[in-house]
Image (tube, helix red, strand yellow):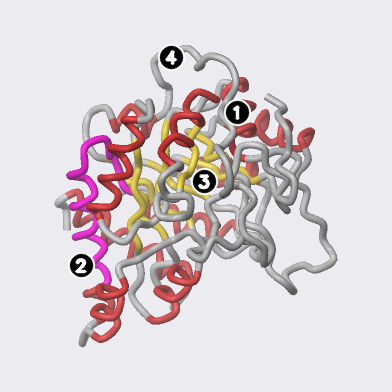
Amino acid sequence: MEGTVRPGCPKRMVFGPCGGVRDDERCEVAEHRCVFLDGPLPEWPGDARPEPPATTSVLLAAAAQGPVVLADLSVVPFDRGSVRRVVAELAPVADGLLAGEHAGRPDFPPALLAAEVRAAGGTPWTTLACRDRNRVVLEQELAGLAAVGVDGVLCVTGDARGPGVRAGASQVFDLDGTRLAALAADTGLTVAVPESPEAPPTELRPARVAGKQRAGAQLCVLNHGRSPARVAAFVAASRAAGATLPFVAGVAVYTDERSARVLQRFPGLHLDDVVVERVLAAPDPRAAGIAAAVAEARALLAVPGVVGVNLSGMGSAAGEDDGARVKAAVAHELRGTA
């Protein structure tokens, strides 16, 4: 599992590249070209893991019966009341709630936040990033997540801190997301991994999905693409590369200028810019944004291999509670209960 860190990678990745490679092929962290773009990508060594036993994951079990909704959990950091309010909005209409790990927005430790989500009645999916934790702490968090009974863990290398974001804090990157996925699988957790279909090198990323599955991934959560057709092409290419796991596709949820631009600026993500501008110019951007998210979700759910959607983004600039109401409205529409 160790492998060799690629020289020049600021994230010390073995199984790169990360999902943040910019459109001009620059590294997410530095100004040089991503060091994984030259030559073949490293392959996961050894045989694929055996098929896991029947899943205990609520979300994966539901996905075997029909489309599922995984909603981003956007809450006020270090605020249990915010967790309770947001979960109360989303839990009735979402099969899982995905807690993120943001470089400039720290929150409770993952296992503690997952416990709070469960206590509030939600089904927690936890993003675990390598940026701020060495291997020992990652192992501790995985054990904690297993003890809490998290429904699944999304194993990511993690976005790097930009200039001026906690400048005095180091960035660890002892592991990358693929190696973390293997550790999580050893813990017995249900393991998801991300992939960015439209980040360079686009032609090599389908094989990365297959490699992550060999490492232990049971689900792939896709970053935003410009269109459902491009997502469909990526899923088909991943199947051709040997990946058999299910996919959850990212749906951009925004209803105002700020919530749209945050997504557009994030490295590795791509939105349909024509749709964005149409939503923002609408007489009622909130209604237009919800309608656009529902339309995108329905189109993505029609893609073979896509078993669910991830309602992603802050949803609203009016705060976390309002963002939760926006995502809940999208989920209601998808379930036909609105």
Q: Which region shows up in magenta?
A: 289-309
- How far apart are the two marked residues, 2 and 4, measured between alpha carbons? 38 Å
Q: Position of residue 4 (x, y in %)?
A: 73, 33
- How far apart are the two marked residues, 3 and 2, measured between alpha carbons? 28 Å
**Amino acid type indicated by mark 2:** Ala
Q: Is residue 285 left or right of residue 182?
A: left
Residue to which mark 2 is pinned: 291
Decide which of 47, 151 is in the foreground and name it.
47
Residue to which mark 3 is pinned: 117
N-term mark: 4 or 3: 4
Q: Position of residue 89 (x, y in %)?
A: 37, 57
Could you tell me which secondary element the residue under label 1 belongs to? helix
Number of on-image labels: 4
103 w.r.t. 124: above or below? below
Residue at x 74% of width, y 74% of height = 164
Q: Marks 3 and 2: which is nearer the front?
A: 2
Q: Marks 1 and 4: which is nearer the front?
A: 4
Residue 184: which numbered mark, if any?
Answer: 1
Which is the main secondary structure of the residues drawn in magenta?
helix
